[in-house]
Amino acid sequence: MKKFNDMDTELLSDIYLIIDKKCAEVESHLENGDLKNFTIVVHSLKTTCRMMGEKKLSEDFLELEMLGKSETYDALSKVRELTPNILDRFRKLKLELMPYINTDSEPALHFSASEIYSLLEEVELSAADFDILRAETATKKLLTYQCDKEFYEKLKQLSDLVNELDYDEARTLANKIKKSV
């Protein structure tokens, strides 16, 4: 089993949690012949694998990204040929990441508009700086506040965007939520 000694365990846990979702997105875009969105997702997976030190897998996602960017019929055919094996290898990382899954939970905090607003600003700033750990810390704290279901769902969506490294969308949503606090 590989050791990810130099990486934050919370980040590894987050990566574990997005593997199935991202693979399903890739497969859906491929099935629909949507090379544009396919390319966007494999680009993020390339970066994720590079962060983890999975050089070969990162290079394979780069190859898919380059094929997707060419947007030709031949590229779509080649992508359909290569993708299943690459996704299988990516999914196998879950076994190596399993020891890093975070099962800790914090007690619920009473709703505080000023604290929530401050944490949302923290998400915006850290996402703008691509500061993964700071953004994740802020979203995890946001999810510990007691609030109504609708507001919690917005916070959960924000957390998912941060965990999936979708920073532009996270900044936009954090700003939108701030306006409703």
Image (tube, helix red, strand yellow):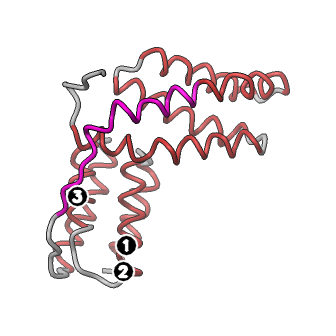
State the count of labels.
3
Between the C-alphas of marks 3 and 1, the distance is 14 Å
Q: Quadrant of residue 83?
A: top right
Residue 43, above or below 167: above
**Viewer-closest of 168 and 84:** 84
**Viewer-closest of 157 and 15:** 15
Mark 3 lies on a secondary structure that is helix
Q: Quadrant of the N terminus?
A: top left
Residue for point 31% across, 56% down: 124
Residues marked 2 and 1 touching at CB (< 8 Å): yes
Residue 118, above or below 19: below
Secondary structure mostly seen in magenta is: helix
Q: Which is more N-terminal, label 3 or label 2?
A: 3
Is residue 30 part of the magenta span, yes or no?
no
**Viewer-closest of 114 and 91:** 91
Between the C-alphas of marks 2 and 1, the distance is 5 Å
Amino acid type for the residue under numbered disc 1: Ile
Read off the residue under disc 3.
Answer: 138
Read off the residue under disc 1.
Answer: 177
Circle nearer the viewer, 3 or 1: 3
**For the view shown, which residue lies furthest in the right direction?**
73
Read off the residue under disc 2.
Answer: 180
Residue 40, image x, y percentages? 59, 38
Span of residues in magenta? 86-105
Residue 72, image x, y percentages? 82, 26
Q: Which is more N-terminal, label 1 or label 3?
A: 3
